[in-house]
Image: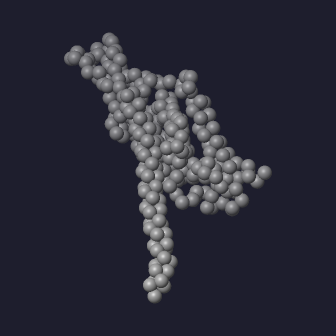
Amino acid sequence: MNVVVAHAIDHVQPPATDAKHRTGSGLDLSISNQWRWVAGKLAVTRHLAVITLVLCVLVLHVPLAHASGDPHLVDRPTPQADSSVWYRQTSSGASQVPITPASDGLFGLDHRVAYDNHGIWNRNVQKNVMYATLATVIGGSFLLGDDTKLGDTFWRSFDAVTVSAAAAQAMKWTFQRERPSQTSDPNHWFGGIHNSSFPSGEVTVISAAVTPFIVRYGSEHPAVYALAALPLYDAIARVKTHGHWQSDVIVGALLGTAVGIWASRRQQSLLVSWLPGGFSVGYVYHF
């Protein structure tokens, strides 16, 4: 009888040990998932920090209004063509003193900076960056398909570009803000559907395009964060060429980033779920 009981115990103990191992393995897996969640949050935080940097750079361009102690001077702002410089004129009109308008508009920091359409700030360069970004995202999506991590990231970037572009356009039609090239007053809103300054569509789309790559690869390959230079460049360039106010590009960057994070966290690419299965395989893998 004792032999039978001992034999039974020998057979019962291994499953208990296996259950213990399974519990420990589950605990390890849970901890691993928690660390991955934290790493993902840190990646998102880093990208938001980059957007904050955009804000800081633009705020540094805010000119301070120059107070004059001369009681004989009266303010008669006269905006000059293609310039952010206004003038303070004496009551007799005999002389003019250049002044800089104080910031206003959304966030209290909108103003026209000195117009600059030269070198890397040239409008054609801005367009080339935009078109190259779109071509890379769309081309990479169809070439690689959705079967690999890189291909899936391209499709999520495609999702973000599509959704953010639609959202930005809807906001343009809603807020109808005049551009700095149209007025020196950043408080001109709802001026007609032909006014489309807020938010910046280009900054929105470029931010949305790069965000999925930064979210999914940033923690493993920090060099990927260099992609944040694209929306940063475009934000500054659009302000310099009087295409947008500072708040236009800041809101555009935040909108694009938010949509990019949303696209990165989805269970599946939105566009892939709408397309036939063959499209998600990718041209490269067909041949």
Give the image location of residue 88, x and y in percent: 32, 19
Residue at left offset 54%, top offset 50%: 160
Give the camera-side residue of 263 and 41. Answer: 41
Residue at left offset 29%, top offset 21%: 66
The relative height of residue 138 versus residue 132 in the rendered view (above or below) is below
Give the image location of residue 112, x and y in percent: 42, 29
Residue 73 can be seen, yes or no: yes
Q: How is the image coloured?
A: one colour
The relative height of residue 43 versus residue 101 in the rendered view (above or below) is below
Residue 37 can be seen, yes or no: no
**Horizontal side, residue 273 vs residue 43: left or right:** right
Residue at left offset 72%, top offset 59%: 278
Give the image location of residue 97, x and y in percent: 33, 15
Give the camera-side residue of 162 and 214. Answer: 214
Give the camera-side residue of 252 and 28. Answer: 28
- Residue at the right extreme, as displayed: 287
The relative height of residue 189 versus residue 109 in the rendered view (above or below) is below
Give the image location of residue 270, x and y in percent: 58, 58
How many badges with numbers are in the image?
A: 0
Residue at left offset 47%, top offset 59%: 29
**Horizontal side, residue 140 vs residue 221: left or right:** right
- Residue at the top extreme, as displayed: 94
For residue 103, what is the image quadrant? Answer: top left
